[in-house]
Amino acid sequence: MNVKISDVDMLLLNTTKIKESSELVNSSFAYIMDNLMLLDSQNSDELIEQEAKMKAMHQLTLARLREAMKENPEKIDNACLLMDVSKNLTFISSQIRTIAQELIFLFEAKIVKHTQGEIQTSNPEDLLNDEKID
């Protein structure tokens, strides 16, 4: 199925957070590429935290699209396409977060995990202890 941008209902698109999500992914990608080129982990903590913001925007987008589909079933096709776009932007954000975690590990020798809205950090010497890292 070939879809042109003009085929997508612009009013429906404007009710979502897809534009904001794409801008956030674009800037996050630029930061992560800069970090890779400079062999630095600067801003990596911020990039990890931005994934939660992306997930919140995705949930808001889904809620607005579901409501639009209920109100006007003719918008279902466009809404489904926009749901896929939002889901894929969220996936890209997740991949950027993973790269940021790896950069912190490479350049700061810290293991960073993102769990339930908080960032947990451990140092390599923590691995020598018998305690399990969550």
Image (spheres, rainbow, N blue to C red):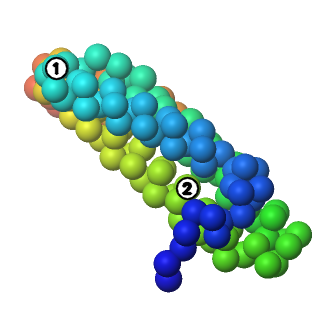
Kindly identify the amino acid type of the residue bearing the numbered disc 2: Ser
Position in image of residue 51 (x %, y %): 47, 38
> Would residue 89 appear left or right of 39 to someone viewing this image?
right
Residue under the point 43% across and 37% down: 26
* Residue occupying the point 54% across, 73% down: 3
Q: Is residue 3 above or below residue 84?
A: below
Q: Amino acid at mark 1?
A: Leu
Q: Which mark is residue 38?
A: 1
Q: Quick check: can you spot residue 48?
A: no
- Residue 40 picture location, percent across and down: 19, 19
Work out which quarter of the rendered image holds the C terminus and state it: top left
Mark 2 Cα shell of 10 Å, populated few (<14), some (14-19), many (≥20): many
Q: Which percent across, then down, holds residue 125?
A: 13, 19
Occupied quadrant, residue 42: top left
Q: Quadrant of residue 108?
A: top left
Mark 1 and mark 2 lie on one chain; the one further toward the N terminus is 1
* Residue 86: assigned label: 2
